[in-house]
């Protein structure tokens, strides 16, 4: 889309923050007003719009996309989104360990076991762990605890959690990132242990490196989005 405005600015009225393009409010893809919960997030999103060149590149505006998702999806469809996120606990990445080589299994244990311990202490969810690809039946009480933890998020932070959990295939890592237990870089390192290990053994693959770089960028955007909500 060609850029159609000269100036982008954040505005506040009656405790609601919005983005104005040449004085006109920005709307979401579903045509709702882009009303934001914090001045910091509004300023950052206004900066995304101001930084656009002759053509608007949505991929270069991750905060705008996350905020729009919060308004268009996680607000109106919260129960459904909560269930989608919590469902990752049934087959969560961090619960499935390699049975070989031992070096990879050790690396997984070192990165993932502390996060499962944190999940149990913080949210009361004790997930089972297995080796290999055989599925493990998770305790019903643990799945219910994860569901409660996810349901406790408001629709703006829920948009960030949803993006992180889907990128990593793990609600455990998503909750740890959203809860400040790990950074975006630590989350990416934990989520991509297998891929990083394989590249170390067999050499880098340009396509895989590009994919991981995109996912790291997505997680960094989520981390920043969540921080700007505070």
Image (cartoon, rainbow, N blue to C red):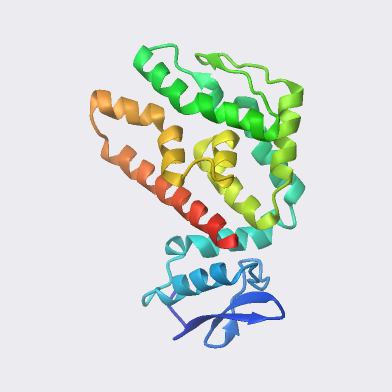
Q: Which residue is most to the left?
A: 203
Could you say where residue 176 lies in the image, as x and y percent from the top left? 56, 39
Q: Is residue 64 above or below residue 55?
A: above
87 over 78 or under it: above or below: above
Q: Quadrant of residue 215?
A: top left
User: Is 19 situated left or right of 99 in this image?
Assistant: right
Residue 81, percent from left and from top: 69, 46
Q: How many marks?
A: 0
As rendered, which of 36 and 55 lies closer to the eye? 36
Residue depicted at x 59% and y 31%: 118
Q: Is residue 188 above or below residue 77?
A: above
Side of 129 relative to 124 (left or right): left
At 54% across and 35% down in the image, what residue appears?
A: 169
Q: Residue furthest front?
A: 121
Residue 12 found in image quarter: bottom right
> In front: 69, or 29?
69
Where residue 34 appears, as percent x and y from the top left, is 63, 71
**Whether residue 101 can be seen here:** no
Is residue 27 shown to the viewer in this render?
yes
Residue at horizontal 69 percent and vertical 42 percent from the top:
150
Q: Quadrant of the C terminus?
A: bottom right
- Image location of residue 24, percent across then percent down: 59, 85
* Residue 131 falls left or right of residue 53: right
Residue 145 higher or lower than 34, as above or below: above
Q: Quadrant of the N terminus?
A: bottom left
Question: Which residue is at a point 39% across and 48% down the rendered structure image?
Answer: 214
């Amino acid at each position: 889309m060609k850029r159609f405005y000269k100036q982008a600015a954040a505005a506040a009225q009656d405790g609601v923050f919005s983005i104005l393009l040449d004085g006109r409010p920005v709307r979401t893809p579903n045509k709702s007003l882009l009303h934001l919960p914090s001045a910091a997030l509004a300023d950052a999103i206004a900066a995304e719009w101001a930084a656009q060149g002759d053509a608007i590149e949505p991929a270069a505006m991750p905060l705008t996309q996350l905020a729009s998702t919060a308004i268009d999806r996680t607000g109106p469809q919260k129960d459904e989104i909560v269930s989608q996120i919590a469902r990752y606990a049934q087959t969560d990445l961090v619960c499935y360990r390699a049975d070989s080589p031992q070096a990879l299994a050790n690396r997984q244990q070192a990165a993932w076991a502390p996060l499962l311990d944190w999940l149990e202490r913080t949210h009361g969810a004790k997930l089972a762990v297995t080796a290999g690809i055989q599925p493990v039946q998770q305790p019903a009480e643990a799945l219910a605890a994860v569901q409660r933890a996810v349901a406790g998020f408001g629709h703006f932070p829920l948009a960030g959690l949803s993006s992180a959990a889907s990128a990593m295939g793990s609600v455990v890592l998503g909750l740890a990132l959203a809860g400040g237990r790990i950074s975006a870089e630590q989350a990416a390192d934990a989520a991509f242990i297998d891929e990083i290990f394989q590249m170390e053994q067999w050499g880098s693959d340009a396509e895989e490196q590009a994919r991981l770089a995109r996912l790291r960028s997505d997680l960094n955007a989520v981390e920043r989005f969540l921080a700007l909500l505070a």
